[in-house]
Image (spheres, grey):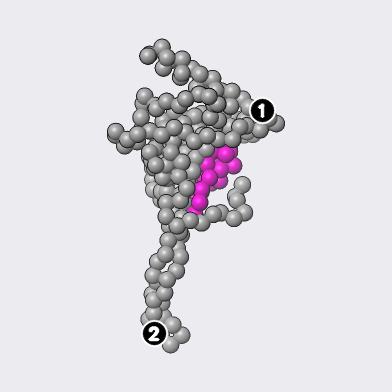
């Protein structure tokens, strides 16, 4: 499940803005994927209740809907999801395996003091890892020729502009789950457009 080489970045890292509807689609996809991959003895599948709460904490407590930044530390995620740090680490591995998110290692330069061979203190620059920058995948592909609309139920900071979800690659034709979820996403989008037209 783990990537062979995790990208390291200075600063906030890659960020993808998501509106409220995109976050709900991600949660819906998580439940469907977990049910599809449920093994004997598993209650809800690979994405357990605790893992789902980690996902919810990342989406709703830490992800900035406007600029897409999301880089909390394990301790903050664990506190928000009410679980252990080890559970956060396990959850992230499973959520990445499910294609819901990925992350980069955020790094920064820092000065450290140390003694040399003669016992004298000296300072040197080093690079330290600070946290992960999380990026989520909206399971709904952008529909061709459909103009996007702002959500009527904005999330995040009050009065912020909600950006449309970023387009994702079309599902692989050999994956029944991906095809089913793409159809589900298209049906949801059609329903939303019909409701918005009726309200107008």
Q: x, y percentage for residue 103?
A: 51, 48
Picture disc at residue 120: 2
Classed neighbour count for the residue bearing mark 2: other residues with Cα under 10 Å, few (<14), some (14–19), many (≥20): few
The residues bearing labels 2 and 1 have C-alpha atoms spaced at a distance of: 65 Å
Horizontal relation, residue 163 to residue 102: left or right: left
Q: Is residue 192 above or below residue 14?
A: above
Q: x, y percentage for residue 132?
A: 46, 51
Q: Is residue 112 above or below residue 178?
A: below
Classed neighbour count for the residue bearing mark 1: other residues with Cα under 10 Å, few (<14), some (14–19), many (≥20): few
Q: Which residues are magenta?
A: 85-105
Q: Which residue is mark 1?
A: 176
Q: x, y percentage for residue 62?
A: 39, 42
Instruction: Tell me which secondary structure the magenta stretch mostly adopts.
Output: helix
Toward the left, the furthest residue is: 158
Which residue shows up at 41% across the image and 48% down it?
Answer: 72
* Numbered disc 2: secondary structure: loop
Is 95 covered by the magenta stretch? yes
Picture disc at residue 86: none
Quick one: 73 or 3, which is closer to the camera? 3
Horizontal relation, residue 6 to residue 163: left or right: right
Q: x, y percentage for residue 19?
A: 42, 32
Which residue shows up at 47% across the image and 39% down it?
Answer: 55
Horizontal relation, residue 94 to residue 134: left or right: right
């Amino acid at each position: 499940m783990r990537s062979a080489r995790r990208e390291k970045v200075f600063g906030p890292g890659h960020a993808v803005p998501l509106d409220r509807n995109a976050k709900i689609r991600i949660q819906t996809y998580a439940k469907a994927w977990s049910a599809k991959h449920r093994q004997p003895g598993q209650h809800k599948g690979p994405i357990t209740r605790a893992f789902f709460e980690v996902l919810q904490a990342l989406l709703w407590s830490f992800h900035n809907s406007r600029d897409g930044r999301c880089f909390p530390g394990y301790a903050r995620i664990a506190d928000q999801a009410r679980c252990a740090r080890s559970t956060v680490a396990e959850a992230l591995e499973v959520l990445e395996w499910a294609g819901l998110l990925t992350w980069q290692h955020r790094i920064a330069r820092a000065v450290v003091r140390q003694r040399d061979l003669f016992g004298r203190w000296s300072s040197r620059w080093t690079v330290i890892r600070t946290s992960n920058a999380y990026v989520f995948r909206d399971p709904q592909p952008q529909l061709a020729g459909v103009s996007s609309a702002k959500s009527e139920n904005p999330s995040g900071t009050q009065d912020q502009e909600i950006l449309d979800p970023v387009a994702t690659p079309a599902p692989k034709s050999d994956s029944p789950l991906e095809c089913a979820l793409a159809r589900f996403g298209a049906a949801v989008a059609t329903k939303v457009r019909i409701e918005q037209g009726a309200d107008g």
